[in-house]
Structures are given as structure tokens and as C-alpha cells.
Amino acid sequence: MNLEDGINKVRGVGIQKAAALRRLGIETVSDLLTYYPRAYEDQSRITRIADLRPGTRATIVGVIHTVVERPTRRRGFTVLTALVGDGTGCAQAVWFNQRFLKSKLREGRRIFLSGKADYAYGGGGQLALTQITALEFLGAEESPASRLGILPIYAATEGLTQKQLRQMMEYALRETAAELTETLPDAVLTEYGLVGRADAFRRIHFPKRAEELSAARRRLAFEELYLIQCGLLALKKRSVESQRGIAHRENGARVAAVLEALPFTLTEDQQTVWREVARDMESPLPMRRLVQGDVGSGKTAIALLALVKTVESGRQGAFMAPTEILARQHYDYLQELLTPLGIRVAFLSGRLAKKARTETDAALAAHEVDIVVGTHALIEDHVAFAALGLVVTDEQHRFGVAQRSALEKRAR
């Protein structure tokens, strides 16, 4: 059996069950295996009947004392009740409209049951198990240990029972074991302590212990994020290689002067980020880099150094902020540090007087401005750069993709 085979290849799946599975979005064997349980029921511990508590789910082992079937007010529907005892007490096991069980529920048989404990209707305070999810018959001397475990609960649909879904999963896992090949490198599995792919699928559907379930979830979540990251890196590689960037010069005297003028020394992490940014800028490929950090972590200092490096390469830099107040703060900061170095900094926003905006536009087009700080006004049609080499966007999530792209295109 192959993972891409139709779901009808799974034993027990006919036309009707295939239609029910399709309602769940399951078309192939692969779809079935990735249809993970929505919840789990812990059946790893047996509870004495005397210790049952209303409103909780529990697993019991006992002997059937009596079996009674009675009709309900709804025509054709019945309630089947078995009185089960384990030596510490008795409880009712209740099934609704499952008459086929009556022939199996014989007095004196030992049974293994899991369900929700509650007070029995008209039972004088006696507890009953309803919503039963497991029913197994045991031999007189058989240990229930082999039946203990964690039961998967799937989001179901009309025409499919939990038992049928579990049987399909068991069959599919067994028949596709050789197909569930590893997708992660051995080094990654070792470094992060991850279980193998086939083992993860077995554990996510049929965990024996909570630790197995946790390991399966961790592995499958890691794989999903890992493959997404690989896809994004591949897209980035294709995007970058298809575009022509600007190879900036190595750090010069002005960058050194800014580092000296900063009121603090770069931390080790800040130095690492700056080296990575500088390396990207010196590459002939375009740079798209997110600098993320807490308030006061030095993000603006990294942006400042990158803008100065751009100016040293004979290019212009643009620093776009989402609000005029924030843009003005950046402008004041850059002007104070860079004017003594002969770097020309300008400000542009929609609130500037028309004459000031016209003068700034002309200065940008004539390369009489090295760095411009502004708001959305930077992406307006009337703004033209002589040699734009770097765009810095503060709080980039506040801008749309089209807005950021409009400014980036002016560097090409």
C-alpha cells in the first residue's frame, strides 16, 4: 500500500465509508494517517468501583451480575444496562440503542470498561458508566494489563464509529510502515532528541504512555515547522538569486566614527548582528533581514550603522516609520550623530509645508540628501531618489507588503 493510494485501499472501507471519510477531508491513505486524534482518553489505570467519582472518566474491570434491556419513549430505541461488580462495589454500564451487545453481555463474564461515571437514572444514588468508549471481555484469569493504554478519540461523522476509525488507522499504519521514510537528517534527530517518523505516527495514534504521546507531538510539530522553514529558505534563495542587488563597500571611517560616538559599546549579540548585516550588504545579492529584539535592545543602532555604510558606498538610505512622532524621533537621533560626520539627513512627512516637501524632493533627486527619515510620505509618487541603496522599515508589521515593496523598488 502506498501513501497516495485512495482511501478505498484500506481494508473495511467500502463505498459508504469512503463517502463518510471524504466528509472529513480524507481522500488518501496519507490523509488518513495525518488525521490526528482530537483528544485522548487515559485508560492506563484501573479505578475501583468504590472510588468512582461523578463527572469523571474512568476504567473499571468487573464481573457482570445482571443485564436488562428496556424500551424508551422513542419508538424503536432501547436502553441496555449491565450491573457490574468488582468486589468493592457495583455500578451500572449503560448503552443506548445498541441491542446487538445484549447477546455478548452474559452474566458471569469479566469485562473491561471505560466511560464517564455519573449517577444512574432512578438508581437510588448508584453510579453508572455512560459514553462508553472501550468494552473488552476478559478470561476468568486474564490480566487486564494488556488492555491498558491511552485511547485516541477522533472527530467523527455520521457513518463512522471511533472503533472503525481506530481499526482503519491500525491497518494503514501496518501496511505503510515501509512508506513512512524519514524526512529529517540524522544529525537533526540526534541534536533535538526526536523519535523517528514512523514511530511518531504510531505513537500519535496509539500511545501507550503519556510520554510517548508527548514525544510524537514534539516530533511531528518539529517536522512541520522544519519543512516550512526549508520551503521559505528555498523561496528566498530563488527570489534573491533572480534579483540584482548592490554590493556595498567594506566598513569605512564613518562607520568607525559612529561606533565611537555611540553612548554605549555594542554587546556581543549586537556585534554579531551587525557583522551579519554588514556581510549581507557587501554581497551582490539583495538583503532582506528582520532585526527583532526588545525595546532598548539596540535595533536602532544596527539600522544607523547600516545607513552609514550605505552612505559610504555612495548610496542613499531611507528610514520609514509608521507615525510622524516616531519618525521625528529617529530623525533627531540620526541628525545629532551624523551631521558632525558630514552626512546629510532630511525629514519628510505628509504634514510638511508644500515648499519644504518640494525642496526635500528636489534634494533627494539631486543626491543632496544622504539619508531621509519619514512616514508613508516616502512611498508617494513624487518622491524620487538619485541612488537609493538601503530601506529601513521600523515596526514593519504596521506597513502592508505593497507599501514596503513600493519603496524597495526605487533602489533597483
Image (cartoon, rainbow, N blue to C red):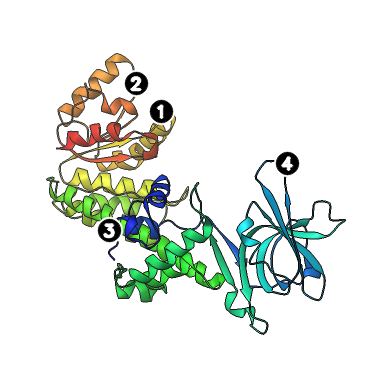
Q: Nearer the viewer, residue 333 or 209?
A: 209
**Disc with the residue nearer the chain's start (4 vs 3):** 3
Kindly report which numbered mark, 1 or 4, lies closer to the viewer in this rendering: 4
* Residue drawn at point x = 36 percent, y = 73 percent: 189
| Distance Cα–Cα, label 2 vs label 4 | 75 Å
| Distance Cα–Cα, label 3 vs label 1 | 55 Å
Asked if labels 1 and 2 touch by Cβ distance under 8 angstroms, the answer is: yes
Q: Nearer the viewer, residue 255 or 207?
A: 207
* Residue drawn at point x = 49 percent, y = 58 percent: 37
Residue identifier under label 1: 324
| Distance Cα–Cα, label 4 vs label 3 | 48 Å
Q: Nearer the viewer, residue 30 or 197?
A: 30
Q: Which mark is residue 19?
A: none
- Above or below, comparing residue 313 to residue 118 in the picture: above
* Residue drawn at point x = 25 percent, y = 24 percent: 360
Q: Secondary structure at mark 4?
A: loop
Q: Secondary structure at mark 3?
A: loop
Q: Residue furthest right?
A: 124
Residue identifier under label 3: 4
Type of amino acid under label 1: Glu
Asked if labels 4 and 2 touch by Cβ distance under 8 angstroms, the answer is: no
Q: Which mark is residue 73?
A: 4
Report x, y in % for residue 5: 28, 58
| Distance Cα–Cα, label 2 vs label 1 | 9 Å
| Distance Cα–Cα, label 2 vs label 3 | 57 Å
